[in-house]
Image: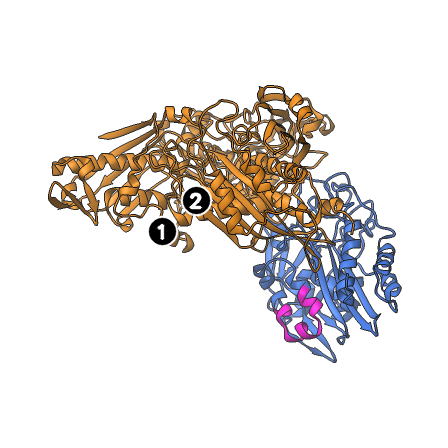
Chain colours: A orange, B blue
């Protein structure tokens, strides 16, 4: 009844190219779009459930210490109050992505300012919020001056290191070199939809509507937190209003709502306030990065060093993988890559929008710009001279790689001038105008994925998996793949996602969802095709499905007829295999930007930006482009505005709302051009697709930084490049 | 949110009586107050909804213009006379908030909007403005948005608005009806106050006072500009802003009015700066000297030290543009 494909070798069949429908790749509108814009697509907190009680998390007003007692009676008389949930299973932190086990529980032991330790449940949200603020508790808090908040003030642990050859010697012998230290500030995921869950308990089974990216892992995490069997839990996450990493793992609200529902015997909803989202879920670590690049006289890299200091709470495994792309992008036989973690008491650091490359590529590409300047070489040419033949450390071959095409086609489309570059060459009124570029790279991940595809007796197709669509376009691409593979119109395909009762997929994260889940649907469809072929008495390879009919062996039959009353249901399983180990796989691209810098105020505004990207097969030109545009928008944020600010005295997040944590707004985002380069990567997945969701974030902030320098002559070593930093670095007229 | 009474008076007198209660707060658009109530920064016993009062008109008053207390920011910015005679005001309003917020925000509400200080809006932090005597978290904390002029050891918060900065440059007056039913007019630059030892008081309003409108004087000649500096280009409060009205006379600076936002607990107007510039030929040296006067007592608190050079540079940019100086 099912088919499994383990990716042990590249799949060069390119089967999707042979299908008659030609839906895959087309800019098809999102099937879920109309419901979303009409407000008819329910997000986690929006399900209408009878008798639901409202829970509000209570958080600690100090960074380290212990809650010694909670005075439930302090709020028992208040209007509407039902209960105070104080339970040792409450989770103190969010789970890391793919953790597959409960995050740290010990709720009364406080490790960061704003850590939730109890839940107040009331009849209405307002009553719960008021009571949560009124709840009295005793605590013993450590003296803040004794608590480490500054990553540079503590001794760091080595987390990951690659050392090869002698980088110091390469630097000393280099014809040209740069040795630069950069700082990037922390980021919040800043999804529009706050973390939210509604839990229902029928005495045996728990049903949870939650805003989660990876239900397959989340169900295990939740079961482990609650000491329940997974079989007794169902998670539903059909629509997610943005995740950006913050919903990879199960968070405090989902566990708290579940415990409350089980204790109270009635449904409980918990929605985090915007401030709680900023204070309690994942942050991207701030980083300190040292880049050392050694080059010969022609600009070929001989030595490559990238060291990063990041931070996290004690006991957390995650360390921002800053050097992830540095491992494979450029050559240099003498290499040193290092990640160190400082244990500090800011909230949990975890995956936020392209962990690793987002901040690692922007600094690397800024350093490459300085190297190009020393070499008096066009920065595009410097990159072109540094495309390695094989992985510089492992020696593995690369799978399909469109870096050269992206650099060349991007430069041409942007109108890049490859002549000598000097800053402060162009001014329009008060504004210095400059251009800058950067390479884009993001590793390609896949995960085990399962999906069920059913050809119904009425000729429609049902696709079922617990995979999520976090705004990325999963509903679209799975529709397109099934439509083409089975020869039906996309309107005849229903994709049902985000339900752990379905076959399990990897979820959304690390840009792996499309290639992994898409492949599982593809494989399931191959199994359905085989069943159809058997019914027609032909080989599957000779089968032609289109327009709702099957042709083969001189016969033609309606799919609905072949499906019969019971339909044809097949499960497809995609498993990563040897191919993933035999090749260095990544998505590549190039960014080009034009930036204006005000000579007086130091305000920087991106005037235009182009990204050229190669990420394997484009599954949907519209949603893929949207992903790229979204990524480039985050580049503008990382380059110019985004920064989590922490109080130096008590360590709390200071700017914990969207008014003060500055993601770019429409006015900051100019026209963004996206050039998608035709590619099939046979090693990446059976559908020849790679990840695109995060690619647009990986390096673009460097292109903006380089354009700022080209515009006004200010080299900055701290991101974001805010007006105060720019005027401090800008040469006087 | 704490439970509260909601009252909707239909006369000014009644509204004034209701606001005499110490924990009553008038509400118009609610764009600032409701956020603060959700955070329990504001915990009124009663909300006095003044929207039934007929105070939204904008109309001529002599040669000047009267803007009703309940005129929305959108209506004010779009008003033909504001656009033609007081463009600095339209520009300032449009530089603030978002279209949706401006549709709800009112003249009086905007004058009364409270600081964006991160420590004021977080009830887990000390704040003398929110809770007198509790201390100031910003002094040793993150003071990026904070004041460089006129602050006190009790409070370094800024008034966050844009509209009032333009009104200060225009020499507007605030019309206030007190609990006794008497109406007075106060120069806008005297409406907001400096924090001193009582930072909990943002402005001069007394219990029972209701703002009924803002009166702009007869229009003056000259170029009117509003420049707001911030890292993102919309939906952000000013790191520093300048409202300027500059009239050039035969190559020299004639009448000039300058007001600054983002620098102090109130829109900042320093007539010595204007005097220093008046009658001079525009020059970068002269602008620098004017900035020196403006900033001679300026004090940074670490994170906001940059505001001193930024203000100097922004003033120069505005004066260059207003005087048409080619640089």
Majority secondary structure of magenta residues: helix
Q: Position of residue B77 (x, y in %)?
A: 64, 68
Task: Tell me if B272 is positioned left or right of A501 in this view.
Answer: right
SS of the residue under disc 2: loop
Q: Is residue A656 left or right of residue B160?
A: left
In this rendering, the answer to whether A61 lies above or below A140 is below
Viewer-side residue, A10 vs A104? A10
Contact (Cβ within 8 Å) of mark 2 with mark 1: no
Of residues A188 and A223, which is closer to you in this image? A188
Question: Is A49 above or below relative to A118?
Answer: below
- Residue B50 location, x and y as percent? 63, 65
First reached walking from the N terminus: tag 2 or tag 1: 1
Which residue of the protein is positioned furthest toward the front in this rendering?
Answer: A297
Q: Residue A210: x and y, percent?
A: 43, 39
Chain on which label 1 sits: A
Q: Is residue B172 visible?
A: yes
Q: CA distance from mark 2 to mark 1?
A: 18 Å
Say above or below: A140 vs B323.
above
Residue bearing the label numbered 1: A28
Q: Which mark is residue A677?
A: 2
| Residue A20 image label | none
Which region of the structure is painted magenta?
A: B75-91
């Amino acid at each position: 009844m099912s088919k499994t494909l383990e990716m042990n070798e590249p799949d060069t069949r390119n089967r999707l190219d042979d299908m008659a429908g030609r839906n895959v790749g087309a800019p098809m509108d999102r099937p879920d779009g109309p419901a979303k814009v009409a407000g008819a697509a329910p997000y986690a907190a929006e399900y209408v459930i009878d008798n639901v009680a409202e829970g509000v998390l209570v958080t600690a007003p100090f960074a380290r210490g212990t809650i010694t007692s909670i005075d439930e009676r302090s709020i028992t008389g208040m209007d509407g109050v039902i209960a105070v949930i104080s339970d040792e299973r409450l989770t103190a932190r969010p789970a890391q992505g793919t953790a597959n086990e409960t995050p740290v529980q010990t709720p009364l032991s406080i490790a960061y300012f704003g850590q939730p330790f109890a839940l107040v449940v009331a009849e209405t949200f307002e009553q719960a919020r008021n009571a949560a603020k009124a709840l009295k508790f005793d605590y013993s808090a450590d003296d803040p001056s004794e608590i480490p908040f500054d990553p540079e003030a503590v001794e760091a642990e080595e987390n990951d290191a690659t050392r090869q050859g002698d980088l110091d010697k390469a630097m000393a012998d280099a014809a040209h070199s740069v040795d630069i230290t950069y700082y990037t500030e922390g980021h919040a995921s800043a999804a529009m939809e706050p973390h939210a869950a509604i839990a229902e308990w029928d005495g045996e089974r728990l049903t949870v509507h939650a805003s989660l990216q990876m239900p397959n892992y989340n169900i295990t995490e939740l079961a482990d937190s609650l000491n329940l069997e997974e079989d007794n839990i169902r998670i539903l996450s059909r629509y997610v209003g943005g995740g950006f990493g913050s919903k990879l793992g199960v968070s405090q609200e989902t566990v708290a709502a579940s415990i409350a529902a089980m204790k109270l015997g009635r449904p409980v909803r918990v929605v985090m306030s915007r401030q709680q989202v900023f204070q309690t879920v994942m942050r991207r670590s701030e980083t300190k990065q040292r880049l050392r690049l050694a080059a010969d006289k022609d600009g070929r890299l001989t030595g490559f060093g990238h060291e990063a200091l990041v931070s996290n709470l004690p006991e957390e495994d995650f360390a921002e993988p800053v050097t992830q792309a540095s491992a494979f992008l450029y050559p240099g036989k003498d290499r040193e890559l290092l990640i160190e973690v400082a244990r500090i008491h800011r909230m949990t650091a975890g995956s936020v929008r392209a962990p690793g490359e987002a901040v690692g590529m922007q600094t690397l590409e800024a350093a490459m710009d300085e190297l190009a300047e020393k070499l008096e070489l066009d920065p595009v040419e410097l990159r072109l001279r540094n495309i390695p033949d094989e992985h510089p450390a492992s020696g593995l071959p690369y799978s399909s790689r469109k870096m050269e095409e992206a650099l060349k086609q991007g430069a041409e489309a942007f109108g890049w001038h490859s002549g000598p570059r000097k800053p402060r060459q162009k001014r329009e009124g008060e504004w210095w105008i400059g251009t800058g570029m950067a390479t884009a790279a993001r590793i390609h991940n896949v995960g085990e994925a399962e999906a069920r595809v059913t050809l119904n007796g009425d000729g429609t197709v049902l696709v079922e998996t617990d995979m999520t669509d976090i705004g990325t376009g999963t509903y679209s691409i799975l529709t397109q793949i099934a439509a083409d593979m089975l020869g039906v119109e996309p309107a005849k395909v229903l994709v049902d996602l985000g339900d752990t009762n379905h076959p399990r997929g990897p979820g959304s994260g690390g840009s792996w969802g499309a290639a992994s889940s898409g492949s599982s649907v593809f494989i399931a469809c191959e199994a359905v095709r085989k069943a159809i072929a058997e019914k027609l008495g032909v080989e599957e390879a000779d089968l032609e499905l289109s327009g709702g009919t099957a042709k083969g062996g001189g016969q033609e039959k309606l799919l609905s007829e072949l499906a019969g009353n019971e339909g044809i249901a097949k499960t497809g399983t995609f498993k990563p295999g040897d191919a993933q180990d035999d090749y260095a796989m990544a998505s590549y691209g190039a960014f080009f930007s034009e930036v204006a810098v005000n000579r007086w105020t130091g305000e920087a505004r991106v005037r235009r930006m182009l990204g050229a990207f190669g990420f394997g097969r484009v599954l949907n030109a519209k949603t893929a482009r949207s992903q790229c545009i979204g990524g480039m928008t985050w580049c503008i944020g990382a380059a110019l505005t985004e920064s989590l600010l922490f109080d130096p005295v008590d360590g709390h997040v200071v700017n914990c709302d969207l008014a003060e944590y500055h993601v770019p707004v429409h006015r900051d985002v100019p026209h963004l051009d996206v050039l998608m380069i035709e590619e099939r990567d046979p090693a990446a997945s059976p559908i020849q697709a790679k990840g695109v969701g995060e690619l647009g974030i990986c390096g673009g902030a460097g292109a903006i930084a380089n354009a700022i320098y080209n515009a006004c002559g200010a080299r900055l070593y701290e991101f974001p490049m805010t007006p105060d930093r720019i005027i401090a670095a800008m040469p006087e007229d | 949110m704490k439970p509260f009474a909601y009252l909707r008076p239909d006369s000014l007198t009644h509204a004034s009586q209701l606001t005499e209660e110490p924990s009553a707060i008038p509400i118009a658009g609610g764009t600032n107050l409701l956020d603060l109530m959700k955070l329990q920064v504001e915990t009124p016993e009663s909300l006095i909804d003044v929207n039934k009062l007929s105070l939204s008109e904008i109309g001529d008053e002599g040669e000047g213009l009267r803007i009703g207390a309940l005129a929305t920011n959108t209506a004010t910015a779009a008003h033909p006379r504001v656009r033609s005679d007081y463009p600095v005001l339209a520009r300032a309003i449009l530089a603030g908030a978002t279209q949706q917020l401006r549709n709800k925000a009112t003249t009086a509400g905007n004058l009364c909007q409270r600081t964006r200080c991160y420590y004021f809006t977080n009830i887990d932090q000390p704040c003398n403005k929110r809770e007198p005597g509790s201390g100031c978290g910003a002094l040793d904390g993150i003071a990026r948005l904070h004041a460089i002029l006129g602050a006190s050891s009790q409070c370094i918060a800024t008034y966050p608005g844009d509209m009032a900065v333009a009104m200060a440059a225009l020499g507007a007056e605030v019309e206030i009806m007190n609990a006794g039913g008497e109406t007075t007019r106060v120069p806008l630059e005297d409406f907001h106050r400096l924090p001193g030892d009582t930072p909990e008081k943002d402005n001069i309003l007394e219990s029972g006072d209701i703002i009924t409108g803002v009166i702009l004087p007869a229009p003056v000649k000259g170029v009117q500009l509003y420049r707001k500096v911030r890292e993102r280009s919309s939906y952000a409060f000013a790191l520093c802003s300048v409202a300027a009205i500059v009239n050039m006379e035969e190559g020299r600076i004639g009448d000039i009015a300058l007001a600054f936002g983002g620098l102090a607990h109130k829109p900042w107007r320093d007539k010595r700066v204007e005097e220093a510039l008046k009658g001079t030929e525009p020059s970068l040296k002269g602008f620098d000297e004017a900035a020196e006067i403006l900033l001679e007592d300026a004090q940074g608190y670490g994170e906001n030290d940059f505001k001193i050079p930024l203000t100097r540079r922004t003033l120069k940019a505005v004066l260059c543009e207003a005087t048409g100086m080619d640089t």
